[in-house]
Amino acid sequence: VPVTASSPARPRLAPYMGGTFLQQAANNAVHVTLPLAVLTSGGSLASAAVVVALAGWADSAGTLLGGWLSDRFHPLSVVRAVTAARVAALAAVPVVLATGVAGVVAVGAAFMVDAVARGVADTARNTLPLAFAGKDKGALEGFNARFQSWFEAGALAGPFLVGALLAVAGAAAGQWLAPLALAGAAFLYLASPRPAMPSETPGRGARPGWDAVKTHLLGKPAALAAFVGLSALTLYPLRAVLPVVWAVDLLGDPAQAAWLVGAFGAGGLAGSLLFR
């Protein structure tokens, strides 16, 4: 059912915002569980850093793929599909670890699949605010502020929930938080009404997003080199490794990284609430 200007926003947005909360809770939980899974599978902190770096590349590739898919399918349908794919990929991690046979390569491969799907979801999700809120500036700003609050609340909840599970039930239980949160997000996205996209007009067959990628990125060596360089040099993914390094060296327990990552989420939530 399309969302129109006369539609009541809150009831219609509730499932989508709930899915946003759970998806970001899973995203930040992975910042803790990825390096812990690598360590549990016999890898080192250096191995964890390599997996995080490769995941950053996979995420970047997913953002490009997400634009291509969002040109051909409704972005909410894309978000639903790749969220389900993330459930499967991340559920494979505790299963692989439980066998005690597969090592870092198998664990890393599961996180690579998740990273590609996460990049696709990020691009598709970023096309939805205009569909949900319309072109009115006030409504759009209100939607973005509300979205960011739910987003940051999930970023805060994920690491702390992982920390609680690690403390109470151990490392294996902590690995299940992200796939279970994403399963809940997938259900809520299915319950969210599909808004009419501004581009759902007779010209819908055009491919502006992918054409722009080909013209302005793939077709320009300098722009492509900058994209590759930024993907390789970005420091943000180190946030998934440094807390574990500090937790091991200073606190003597890798699981304590959950509280350090959670503190980062607390700052993000405070900023989003101030923006509102």
Image: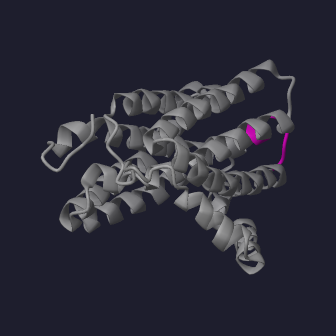
What's the colour scheme?
A: one colour
Above or below, comparing residue 13 to residue 68 in the picture: above
Task: Identify the residue at horizontal 66%, vertical 70% (top origin).
Answer: 215
Q: Quadrant of residue 17?
A: top left
Task: Identify the residue at horizontal 78%, vertical 38% (top origin).
Answer: 109
- Identity of the residue furthest to the front in this view: 202
Q: Is 113 on the left or on the right of 260, as rendered?
A: right
Q: Is 123 on the left or on the right of 213, as rendered?
A: left
Let me know if residue 21 is in the magenta part: no
Return the x and y of residue 93 as percentages of the image width and height.
70, 30
Return the x and y of residue 182 as percentages of the image width and height.
50, 33
Above or below, comparing residue 106 to residue 46 in the picture: above
Question: Nearest the camera: 157 or 187?
Answer: 187
- Quadrant where the C terminus lies? bottom left
Question: Nearest the camera: 220 or 142?
Answer: 220
Q: Is 50 on the left or on the right of 113, as rendered?
A: right
Magenta-drawn segment: 37-44
Task: Identify the residue at horizontal 33%, vertical 56% (top origin).
Answer: 130
Task: Identify the residue at horizontal 14%, vertical 42% (top origin).
Answer: 8
Instruction: Tally the marks.
Output: 0
Return the x and y of residue 260 as percentages of the image width and height.
54, 54
